[in-house]
């Protein structure tokens, strides 16, 4: 009995030590969580090809990992460079013609001030806008630096995941204190969610962008490719999504006096672009990862505040993992719901 008590005490002390060290490590390294989650996402997507290059073609691990990382970086970098190039041209044009733009905006605002008897351009409003701009600029620069740092750390972690993938997975099987069937269940569930979101979300955004592009071409939107890229990016955001693109376009039509086009843009955006998003998003993600639409929706909403942009993928995974752990608990400890026996 004493021996049993001593073992329990030792076990509790070790678990408390592990928990304390885990909390300390989490607090100190929490800024690296987006990079780690991004690395895990790419590992799941590239794992099959890494093992293929190593096993079938006998490539060295470092060379295979380097090639896959380069290809993944190009796939990510090209859309970003395209967007940056487009935005840079817009910013350059705005700076070059700043006085004309300000005059045009002021004329447009004055028209509605006289029409509705309100005052929009005041010294107080100008002061607030100037203050807000001064506050936003450092935040944008800081976010840009954090993004570059996260990408660098992501690929640093990904390299070691790819090179030591088999050993990492074997250690996972050894250390996780679950039955083998439950470990396989965790791995299958996590990988399915990663595939569903990492592949499904960009595909959905691209499909939605193509549908939007057709409407832009029919309505004669200026620079439709630019707005196509904007739709593809905003379509990945929860709740509002592509409305961040087609609503401003409709407002631009109204501002230019094209009321009919503005109304058509809103109707097409809400009725077609939005519907395509909802239908195709839920159908595709259900097909790829068997993910319930509610898990996807609420997962994205809670994921972005926690993990940042990578929360688009890991928000739904967090909810699915919670439900999966309940299932594993029931299976691991043989918990069964027993119906009440009739009296």
Image (cartoon, rainbow, N blue to C red):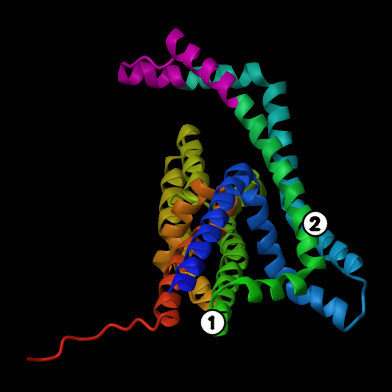
Mark 2: give few (<14), some (14-19) or many (20+) Cα within 10 Å.
few
Q: Which residue is mark 2?
A: 74
| Residue 11 vertical position relative to residue 104 in the rendered view, above or below | below
Quadrant of the rendered image containing residue 31: top right
Residue 98: image x %, image y %?
Answer: 65, 20
Q: Residue at left 50%, top 53%?
A: 303
Q: Nearer the viewer, residue 336 or 226?
A: 336
Q: Nearer the viewer, residue 273 or 327?
A: 327
| Residue 12 vertical position relative to residue 123 in the rendered view, above or below | below
Quadrant of the rendered image containing residue 73: bottom right
Q: Residue at left 80%, top 77%?
A: 51
Mark 1: give few (<14), some (14-19) or many (20+) Cα within 10 Å.
few
Instruction: Describe the element under mark 1 as helix, strand or loop.
Output: loop
Q: Residue at left 47%, top 46%?
A: 261
Q: Nearer the viewer, residue 131 or 267?
A: 131
Q: Taking 78 as reference, is 15 left or right?
A: left
Q: Residue at left 60%, top 72%?
A: 191
Residue farthest toward the top in the current orientation of the protein: 123
Q: Nearer the viewer, residue 106 or 187?
A: 187
Q: Which residue is mark 1?
A: 179
Q: Taking 68 as reference, is 121 left or right?
A: left
Q: Taking 266 as reference, is 94 left or right?
A: right
Q: Which mark is residue 164?
A: none
């Amino acid at each position: 009995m004493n021996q049993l008590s001593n073992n329990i005490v030792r076990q509790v002390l070790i678990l408390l030590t592990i928990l304390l060290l885990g909390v300390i490590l989490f607090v100190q390294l929490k800024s690296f969580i987006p990079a780690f989650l991004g690395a895990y996402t790419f590992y799941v997507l590239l794992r099959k090809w890494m093992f293929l290059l190593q096993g079938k073609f006998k490539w060295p691990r470092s060379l295979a990992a380097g090639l896959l990382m380069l290809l993944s970086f190009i796939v990510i970098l090209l859309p970003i460079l395209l967007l940056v190039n487009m935005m840079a041209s817009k910013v350059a044009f705005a700076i070059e013609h700043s006085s004309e733009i300000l005059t045009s905006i002021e004329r447009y605002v004055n028209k509605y001030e006289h029409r509705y008897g309100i005052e929009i351009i005041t010294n107080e409003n100008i002061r607030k806008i100037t203050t807000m701009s001064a506050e936003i600029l450092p935040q944008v620069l800081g976010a840009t630096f954090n993004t570059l740092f996260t990408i660098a750390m992501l690929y640093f972690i990904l390299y070691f995941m790819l090179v030591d993938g088999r050993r990492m997975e074997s250690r996972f099987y050894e250390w996780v204190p679950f039955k083998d069937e439950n470990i396989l269940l965790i791995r299958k569930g996590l990988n399915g969610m990663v595939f569903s979101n990492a592949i499904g979300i960009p595909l959905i955004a691209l499909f939605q962008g193509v549908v939007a592009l057709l409407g832009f071409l029919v309505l004669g939107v200026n620079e439709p490719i630019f707005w196509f890229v904007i739709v593809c990016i905003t379509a990945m955001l929860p709740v509002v999504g592509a409305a961040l693109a087609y609503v401003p376009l409709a407002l631009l039509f109204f501002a230019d006096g094209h009321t009919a086009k503005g109304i058509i843009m809103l109707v097409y955006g809400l009725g077609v672009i939005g519907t395509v998003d909802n239908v195709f998003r839920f159908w595709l993600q259900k097909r790829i990862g068997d993910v319930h639409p509610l898990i996807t929706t609420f997962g994205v909403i809670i994921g972005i505040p926690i993990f940042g942009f990578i929360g688009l993928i890991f928000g739904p995974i967090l909810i699915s993992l919670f439900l999966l752990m309940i299932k594993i608990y029931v299976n691991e400890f043989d918990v069964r719901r027993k119906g009440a026996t009739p009296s």
